[in-house]
Amino acid sequence: MIGYTTIGVKDLGAAKKFYSELFGAEVLVDVGRLAMIGTSMTEPKIAVCQPFNEQDPHPGNGNMVAFPGGSKEGAKALYNKAIELGATCDGAPGQRIPDMFYGAYVKDPNGNKLCFFDFS
């Protein structure tokens, strides 16, 4: 259902590197102040951009982008990779809802909150 999600960043080059490496993906679209990163134009993507109004980007309070890990191990692996790439912990990997939801939370280098999850 979701085509892409856009987040604001200060350093576009660093953000493209962070998300490309995190997901083993590539920059599919690059129009200067905005780049879309993914594995296919027909699959959901993450877009990073310098805000149109030329003001500093800032993460919203309560906003978060969630990425499926495919399994608990996959969610934990994405969390660990994000930390290696410069993200900070915002909730260590663990079972959040018994027998239903496993999540791991980070803030990317720009402060955007990300969740890596598995429904299990």
Image (cartoon, grey):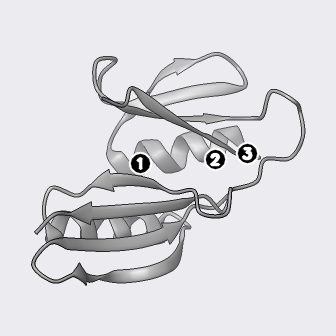
The amino acid type of the residue labelled 2 equals Ala
Left of 68 or right of it: where is 45? right
Please name the residue that numbered disc 3 is placed on.
Answer: 11
Please name the residue that numbered disc 1 is placed on.
Answer: 21
The amino acid type of the residue labelled 3 equals Asp
Indicate the secondary structure of the residue bearing disc 2. helix
Residue 66 position by quadrant = bottom left
Residue 12 image position (x, y, % from top left): 68, 39
- Residue neighbourhood size for the residue with mark 1, other residues' Cα within 10 Å, grouped as few (<14), some (14–19), many (≥20): some
Q: Quadrant of the C terminus?
A: bottom left
Q: How many marks?
A: 3
Please name the residue that numbered disc 2 is placed on.
Answer: 14
> Residue at the location (43% across, 71% down)?
105
Residue 63 image position (x, y, % from top left): 57, 56
Asked if the residues shown at circle 3 and circle 2 are in contact, with their CB atoms under 8 angstroms apart, the answer is: yes
Q: Quadrant of the N terminus?
A: top left
